Image (spheres, helix red, strand yellow):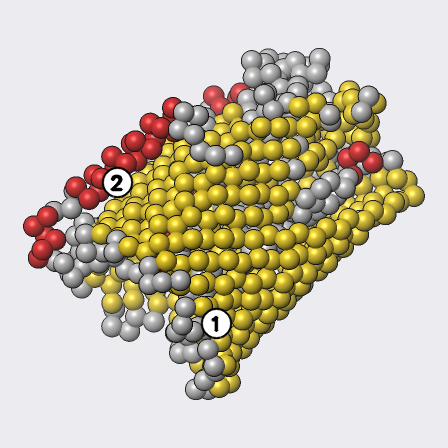
Amino acid sequence: MGFNPQNFPEHNKQCVLAVAVMAAGIAGVLPQTTLAQESSMALEEVVVTARKRAESIQDVPVAVTALSAGQIERGVINSVVDLKKLAPNVELIAQPFAGAALSASIRGVGLDDLEKTFEPTVGVSIDGVFLASTAGANVDLFDIESVEVLRGPQGTLFGRNTVGGVININRTKPTKEFGVKLQATFDEFNRQDFQAMVNIPLGERGGIKVAGRSLQSDAFTDNVTRGENPDNRDLVNSTVSVLYDFTDNFSAQFTWDNYNDNSRLVDQINITSIPYNGFGFFGPDYQDVTSGDLSAANDYKTTYSGGKFYSTIQGNNYALTLNGSAGNHDIKFITSKMETKEQMDICSWGAPITGQTAFVLFPFGTGTENNPSGDPCFFPVLRDQEFEQASSELQVTSDFDGPFNYVAGLYYMTSDAPFVTGPVQVIESLQELEARAIYGEVIWNITENWGLTAGGRYTEEEKDFSVTAAAFPNGQDFFFEDDEFTYRLVLERKFDFGMIYASYSTGFRSGGFNSRGTTPNTVGPYESETVDSLEFGLRSQFLNDRVTLNLTYFDSTYEDKQEAVVTAGDGSFIYNGQPEDCGGPTCTFIFNAGEVDNSGLEIEAMALVTDGLTLRAAIGTLDSEYSKFDYAGVDIADIANVTWAPELTAALGAEWLLNIGAGQLALNANFKYTDEAWGRTDWTTYDPATGPKMLVDSYEVLDVSATYTRDMGRGMLTLRVYGTDILEDGGRLARPFDAGAFAFADIVPRRTLGATIGYEF
C-alpha cells in the first residue's frame, strides 16, 4: 500500500494543516530578543533505550514518547492507562474482566479481551521483563524512573506480540545510600493512597530498596438498586530489591514484588437495546429504558447493577538481572518468574436484577461466591485462573568507536495458564507455551551523515492446549506451532538540525486457542497475525536546541488479522451452514479476518519558551480500515469498523516553574482531545439505528496541577493539588461491548480533585 494524497481523508488533511500551523506557531511565540540573551538555555536531553542501548531520543529512528519520573508525578499520571494523555495515536483502557488488566491499541492495532490464550498486540515490559498476559499490565505508576511508549511494530528487538508497539517501564534502582521517601494522596472519592520507600546501603558496593503501597478508595458512583456507595480500589503492594556491584565490571540485582489487589470494580451499565432479540429485558420497572439510559441521565453518577463486580489478582514476581562488561561489550542476563492468581465474579452485567424486579434472561443461577444472597442473576460467571510465566534473556551490546555496532541476544519463555469457569458455561482448560528466539541488529555509520540499521529475529513456539466443555465431555487435546522471521531496515541521514529516516519493519502476533471456546469451531486453533510497516521520520532541534519537532508518517498492512467476534450462543448463529450452540448465552469466534490498512501522521513538539516555561504538543491522525474481513466465508469489510482507532488524538500541555521564597512552584496543564471510536460488536447483526450504542463519542480532558517543593534542610517537602478531567463532572462511557445476546459498558470518572503530600531525604 502506498501513500496517495488524493486518497488521504479530508479530515486528516485538515488536521495535518492545523498541526503545521501550530508547529510554526510554537517557534513564533518564542521571544526573539530573549534568544540572543539566553542562548545557553536548552531543553534537557532525553535518553531512551528503544534500541536496547542508551541513546538520545533525537538520535533514535523509532517513534517513541518518553516520560521522566517528574513528568509522571507532576502530570498526575497514576497508571499505565493515563499514558494515552501524552502520546499520539495511543488508546489505553482498563480491561475489567482480568486483574489489573490492560486493553491497549496503538495506531489502530489493539486487543480488548482477557483470556490468557489471547496474545497482546502491545507489549509491556517492566525492568526488562516482558509480560506474557494483559493481566497485571495496567500498572500503577509508583516508584518509576522513566516510561517509554514505542509506536509501531517492534518485532526485531522486542519480539512476538509487539505488532502495535511497546510500553517500556523502568523503576528506580537501589541508590546504595540511606534515604526515605514518603507520600500520601487523598481525593474526593475517599482515596487513601499511602506510599513509602526506604533505601539502605549494603556495605560500600551495594544497596537495598524496600517499597510499599496501600491504596483504598470508593467508587465515584452510587448504586441505586443496592442503595450504597460501593468500595472501589483495595490494593496492597510491596517490593524488595537488592543491588550489589561485585566488581567495577559486574553487578547483580534481585527484585521481589508481592501484590494483592482485591479491588471491587465500578458497576457496569447495561446498554442492551429494548426489545432485544425479541424479548423484554428488565421487568415491569425497566421495560422502556436500560440501566445505561438511567445512568446517562444522571451524568453516569448512578448505577443499577443488582450484583457486585469483583476482579482480583494476587501474585509474586521474581527477577534477577546480571550486568557485566568485557572490552567493548556490555553483557546483560535477565531471568524472571511470575506467579498470579485471579478471580472474576460477576452476576448482573449492569442489569438491576433483584428478587423483587427480575425478569431473568438466562435463569441459570442464583448467585455466585461473592453474591450469595440468592437473588436471581442475569448471567452469573465465576472464574478462577492461575498463571505462571518464566523467561530468560541474554543480551550483548557493543560499544565500538568505529562505524559498526550491534546488539544480539537469545530469549526463552514458558507459561502455564489453567482456566476454570462456570456455572452456566462450564469450561476447564490448560495451555502450556514454550517460545524461543534469537535476534540481532547492526548499526552501520556509512559516512559521517549516512547510517544504515539492519536486524532480524527468528522465533519458534509451541502451544499445548487441552479443554473439557460441553462439546468435549471427556476432554480433548490440541497443538499449535509456528516459526516466524521478523526484521527491520532503517536508512537515516543526519543534518545540522537533526535527521530524517525511512524504515521498513515487520512483526507478528502469535496464533493459538480460545480458552473460553466450547465447540471445535470456537476453540481453534487460529493462525498468527503479521504486520508490515513503512515509516518516514523527521527528528529536529532548532533555535539553539530550545525547540524540538518530531514528525512521523506511517503506512502499515496487517494480514491474517485476528478478530474476536462474540455472537449469541443459542444456535441462532450459523457457521458453515450449521447452527452453533455453545451451551450458553454467548459464543466467541476468532477469525483470521484478513487485512487492515493503517496510515497516519504523528507530531510531537516541545519548546522552552523561557527558563521556566515549557510548551509541548502531541498530535496523531489515523486512517484505519479493513480491506478484507473474512467472516465465516463472507467478506464484510464494507460494513466493519476497526475498534479503538480514533481518527484524531491531540494533546497540548505546558509547565511553568516559578521560584517562590525558598521553594519552587510547578504549574502543569495538559489538554487532550480524542476523536470518536468504535467498541466491539458483531458487524453482521449490528444496526446503529436501533443500537446498542457502540460508537464512543469524542471527548476532551483537561488535567491541571500545582506542585510546591521546598528544601527543609533535612529533606524535601512536596505539596501538590490537582484536578483531572476538570471540564466535566460525573462519568463518561468508556468501553461498550456487544456480547450478542446482551450488551454492557464500562464507565470512568470525570472531574476528580485531590491533593498529595510527600517528604523525602
Report which quarter residue 88 is drawn in.
top left
Q: Residues within 10 Å of mark 1 (few under 14, many from 20)?
A: some
- Residue 756 image point, x, y percent: 36, 54
Q: Residue at x 68, y 28 (%)?
A: 630
The residue furthest right is 474
Report which quarter residue 670 is drawn in.
top left
Relative side of 413 to 572, left or right: left
C-alpha distance separating marks 2 and 1: 37 Å
- Residue 400 image point, x, y percent: 43, 74
Q: Which amino acid is tagged 2? A: Ala
Relative side of 251 to 654, left or right: right
Among the two numbered marks 2 and 1 on one chain, the one whose residue lies closer to the N terminus: 2
- Residue 517 image point, x, y percent: 77, 38
Q: Which residue is disc 2 drawn over?
A: 23
Q: Nearer the viewer, residue 129 or 752?
A: 129
Q: Nearer the viewer, residue 336 or 376?
A: 336
Position of 138 relative to 732 (above/below): below
Q: Which residue is disc 1 drawn over?
A: 398
Position of 340 relative to 12 (above/below): below
Q: Which amino acid is tagged 1? A: Ser
